[in-house]
Image: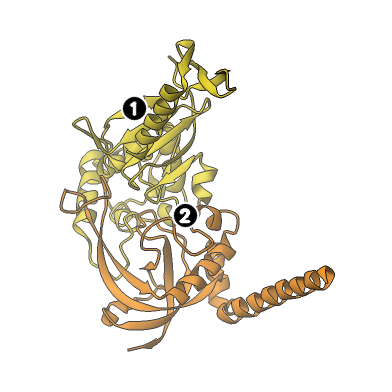
Chain colours: A yellow, B orange
Amino acid sequence: MNKKKFVRAEEGKPPGISVIYYDTDGNITIRYHDKNGKIGSHAWRNNNPGNLVYGDGSHAKETGGIGKAKKRTVFPDYDTGKESMRLLLKKDFYQKLTLNQLPRKYTGVKPEDPDTKEVEDYRRTIRIQTKFDMERTVKSLNKEEYEKLLKAMETHEGWQEGFEEFKEVEEITGTRVDKQRVISEYRIRGAKGERWVLKDAAIAMHGLFLEALQN
Amino acid sequence: MRCSQKHGKSRMIKFFFITLLIWSTALQSEPTQEDWVKAAKNPDYFVHVKLSGTVKRKIFPGPPHFLSVEKGDWEEPRTILEIDNASLARLIEAQSSITPNLYMGEFIDPTFKADEPNANLVTLDSSFSGEPDNIEIYENKIVTIDAVISAQPTRCHTPFVVEIVKVLSHE
């Protein structure tokens, strides 16, 4: 089955652990942090390789964000998330920085504060992966070099694929009533066609579906 | 009777909005020359807000999971201000005046119950003047600051981020 485009996303429960994506047909895909022995990183769960914050939503919406989870933007796919990161780092306040300065700004270290261990690791990752002179500015990089920088940053941010679950939303297309004119069965349309389901079974199916969204 | 009730209600609503206007004007001073210079780079720099709370240092978990430093996420230390409810109300008002169509609907419940925990923890970003603010010397003390709403940096852990313009008073 062809995967439909995701058009909306939100945090699962408890907040921040899973991300729920809704596609154009209302079907649901859930990306989990820790399920079935697989750990999915935040960047992967949100399709956000730069772990860009949602903030007031302006950059997120301008660049194709479809929701937020744990304060960070959720994008419909990896490419959109990557493009958003690409555009963010094109802004003046990043362009003027050297590669040594960039990790401090990107990870939010105040100018007067010392480097964090994360900043040191970030620099090391950029230096080893790109082999650039770390005193070069972001602005000085050509297109190919810029992509190398983004790739190195993505490595530090951590893209790790975890467990993903697809849940098809089935539609009620008809009902049958008993002699007392009370609904006894529902006709349900899904990927495998239409079928009649007893009312109790249909309610139980709906309950299981809602329960899955809570995980 | 009904007409007079309606008239009374309308006067009350008008009174409420006038009060709100006076209240918000009093708390948000006029832009200064420095504001205009900063605003040339970032339009969010206009809104001042007075905040009171306790200065704290807090370590937040960073990549790759943003969940737990103990389980291997990078440490991201921040200086924060744990603000009181009156300050939170002012901050929400100030933030929503910058992004009226985005912020109130998506970040904060209008009844001031944030959709994220710890809405009263406010990250103190780099100082407004660009000079070190040395706010850390007030760690665990109550301060009142004049702050401006800051554009949220890439790595943000709290719903609100501000820059310190001035420490107005402290313990």
Q: Nearer the viewer, mark 1 or mark 2?
A: 1
Numbered label attached to residue A92:
2
| Whether residue B75 can be seen here | yes
A185 or A160, nearer to the observer: A185
Residue type indicated by callout 2: Asp
Residue A50 screen position, x and y as percent: 36, 44
Kindly state the secondary structure of the residue where label 1 is placed.
strand
Image coordinates of residue B112 in percent, x first then y, are 49, 64
Mark on residue B63? none
Are the residues flagged by discs 1 and 2 in contact, CB closer than 8 Å? no
Q: Is residue B163 above or below residue A30?
A: below
Residue carrying label 1: A165
Q: Chain of mark 1?
A: A
Across and down, in percent, residue B95 comes to 52, 65
- The residue carrying pointer 1 sits among few (fewer than 14), some (14 to 19) or many (20 or more) residues within 10 Å by Cα, namely few
Q: Residue at x 54, y 44 (%)?
A: A62
CA distance separating discs 1 and 2: 40 Å
Residue in view at x 42 percent, y 32 percent: A77
| Residue located at (52% from left, 74% from top) | B48
**Where's the C terminus of chain A, which quadrant?**
top left
> For the residue labelled by badge 2, is the local secondary structure a helix, a strand or a loop?
helix
Indicate the amino acid at tag 1: Glu
Q: Chain of mark 2?
A: A
Q: Which residue is at a point 73% across and 73% down the rendered structure image?
A: B14
From the viewer's perspective, tell me whether residue B14 is left or right of residue B26.
right
Q: Is residue A144 visible?
A: no
Give the image quarter of residue B57.
bottom left
Q: Along the horizontal axis of the image, is B171 left or right of B75?
A: right
Could you say which is closer to the camera, residue A159 or residue A30?
A: A30
